[in-house]
Amino acid sequence: MKSEVSEALREREALIKELKASCDKGTDKPRTAVSNAITRTITHIKKHHPSLAGHLKEYIHLGSSCIYTPPVDPNWNN
């Protein structure tokens, strides 16, 4: 009985590992596409509004998540 439980636990861990690996592979392409699109857009904005492009480049963090973290809440009404 003890060996059956041990074997089931090993099998469970192997399945979890494979599922995680397959999920990671599936999310890398969209993440990369989004990161590339943001980078291209900031480059395009730079031609027309360099200070806005500099702000976005400094405060948009790309990686497993895209995060916008300005130092203070911007006042969009000015």
Image (spheres, rainbow, N blue to C red):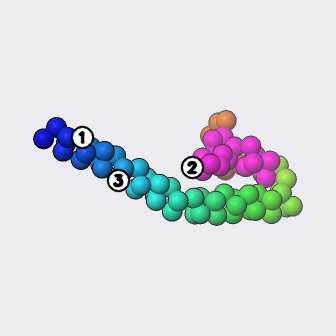
Start and end of the magenta stretch? 52-70
Q: Does residue 75 show up?
A: no
Q: Is residue 28 magenta?
A: no
Q: Residues within 10 Å of mark 3 (few under 14, many from 20)?
A: few
Most foreground residue, 27 or 7: 7
* Mark 1 lies on residue: 6
Residue contact at pointers 1 and 2, CB within 8 angstroms: no
Which residue in the structure is indicated by mark 2? Answer: 65
Tag count: 3
Secondary structure found at label 2: loop
Q: Residue at x 79, y 52 (%)?
A: 53
Disc 3 marks a residue whose amino acid type is: Leu
Of the 4 image quadrants, the one containing the N terminus is: top left
Q: Are marks 3 and 1 in contact (CB under 8 Å)?
A: no
Q: Alpha-carbon distance for marks 1 and 2?
A: 37 Å
Q: Residue at x 78, y 51 (%)?
A: 52
Amino acid type for the residue under numbered disc 2 = Ser
Which marked residue is nearer to the observer: mark 3 or mark 1? Answer: 1
Q: Is residue 26 left or right of residue 10?
A: right
Q: Earlier in the sequence, mark 1 or mark 2?
A: 1
Residue assigned mark 3? 15
Q: List x then y, in percent, for residue 14.
A: 36, 50
How would you rate the neighbour count of disc 1 (Cα within 10 Å): few for under 14, some for 14-19, many for 20 or more?
few
Q: Is residue 56 magenta?
A: yes
Rounded to the nearest angstrom, the CA distance separating label 3 from label 1 is: 14 Å
Residue drawn 74% across the image and 62% down it: 41
- Compare residues 2 and 33 and report the one nearer the observer: 2
